[in-house]
Amino acid sequence: MPPLLLFLAGVAAGAGAAVLAPALAPEASRNLRPVLRAGLKLAIAAGTAMRSATAEAAETVEDLYAEAQAELAEAAEAPPPPAGAPRAKRAPAKRKRAPARAPADA
């Protein structure tokens, strides 16, 4: 179950129990206290897991951003070729010769 759903389930259980407990009876309030505590512990655990997952995702995005920025800076620092410098010549494409045909007078 994703951490967000765990968090929302814990919050809903805790809030529902807190609202209903005094209305039902004082004994129910005592019996629901452990349920409330369990719901809050679940919400805290889910919040901690979400915080950790979010921090890891943010770190990954920051790393990718820094790498891309470094690549752009490296490409910008490459000096352009001098104006009078000869360009590199491309090798001519080699043509494939058709296979020799046998004489037709056979």
Image (cartoon, grey):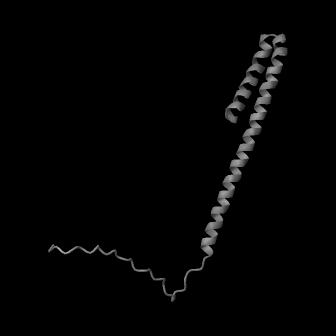
Q: Position of residue 70 (x, y in %)?
A: 66, 66
| Residue at the extreme front | 106
Height in image: 76 above or below 48?
A: below
Q: Residue at x 59, y 80 (%)?
A: 79
Height in image: 46 above or below 90?
A: above
* Closer to the camera in the image, 81 or 105: 105
Q: Position of residue 72 (x, y in %)?
A: 61, 67
Q: Quadrant of residue 78?
A: bottom right
Q: Which quarter of the rendered picture does the N terminus lie within?
A: top right
Q: Residue at x 49, y 87 (%)?
A: 86
In-image side of 97 versus 55 (left or right): left
Q: Quadrant of residue 22?
A: top right
| Residue at the extreme left | 105
In-image side of 68 versus 51 (left or right): left
Q: Quadrant of residue 24?
A: top right
Q: Residue at x 55, y 86 (%)?
A: 82
Height in image: 67 above or below 59?
A: below
Q: Position of residue 97 (x, y in %)?
A: 31, 75
Q: Residue at x 83, y 15 (%)?
A: 31
In-image side of 91 versus 101 (left or right): right
Q: Position of residue 95 (x, y in %)?
A: 34, 76
